[in-house]
Image (spheres, rainbow, N blue to C red):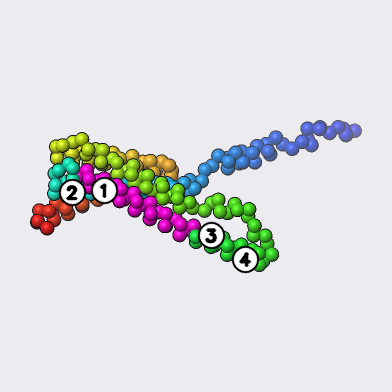
Amino acid sequence: MASNYTNPAAKLPPPSEAPPQMSLDVEESQEFDYSKRSQWLRAAVLGANDGLVSTASLMMGVGAVKQDIKAMILTGFAGLVAGACSMAIGEFVSVYSQRDIEISQMKRDKKRADAAGFSGEDGGEGEEGLPNPMQAAAASALAFSVGAMVPLLAACFIREYRVRIAVVVAAVTVALVVFGWLGAALGKAPVVRSSARVLIGGWLAMAVTFGLTKLIGSRGL
């Protein structure tokens, strides 16, 4: 005679069915979209590198024809102020143009949705993801100033011409590596490749500026 007993545990779902979904939710919540950092990260890294390389190149160019420390420092300071203002204005205009384009596209999408009978209301959520011109401008100006301060501080207290040039090059080299590493680390990009690219570019800029200024100065132009 066959038994009619049924194990109650057989009606329960296997315990292994729930954990995979839960683990996927945990993994998704822990994931971070590094592209969200792209706006401010690009502005900050670009500003810092521009401030460092352009100011150091200006100081090296002036130092190629004039050994006076006062002329070198004044040139670097003028480069810091002019560059920070230029970066802030340029970034503000650029990001504001991008913002206007995205707002226009959102309005066109809303009109198409309304015409198709769908509700185009998003409660203002769409505007939260728009680029911020003031934030980008402030980040660029601040980063440029921070980068420009490196060669200025390196040259401020050294009277000897050759030692001053060597200290500026050394300080800029270290800063270039640090900025390259920082940008790569924050954006989860290859660190060595990014640092090498930034370093070589900065060296080339300083060498070209120094060499051309020295050449022109030696010809008495």
Looking at the image, tell me whether mark 4 or mark 3 is earlier in sequence order.
3
Residue that badge 3 annotates: 103
How crowded pointer 1 is (Cα within 10 Å; few <14, some 14-19, many 20+) is rated as few
Looking at the image, tell me whether mark 3 or mark 1 is earlier in sequence order.
1
Which residue appears farthest toward the right when viewing the image? 1
Question: Magenta: predominant secondary structure element?
Answer: helix
How crowded pointer 3 is (Cα within 10 Å; few <14, some 14-19, many 20+) is rated as some
Q: Secondary structure at mark 1?
A: helix
Amino acid type, label 4: Arg
Looking at the image, tell me whether mark 1 or mark 4 is earlier in sequence order.
1
Nearest to viewer (mark 4 / mark 2): 2
Which residue appears farthest toward the bottom when viewing the image? 115
Q: CA distance from mark 1 to mark 4?
A: 51 Å
- Magenta stretch, residue numbers: 72-99
Residue at 18% over, 45% down: 71
Q: CA distance from mark 3 to mark 2?
A: 46 Å
Q: Secondary structure at mark 3?
A: helix
Residue 89, compared with residue 146, is above or below; it is: below
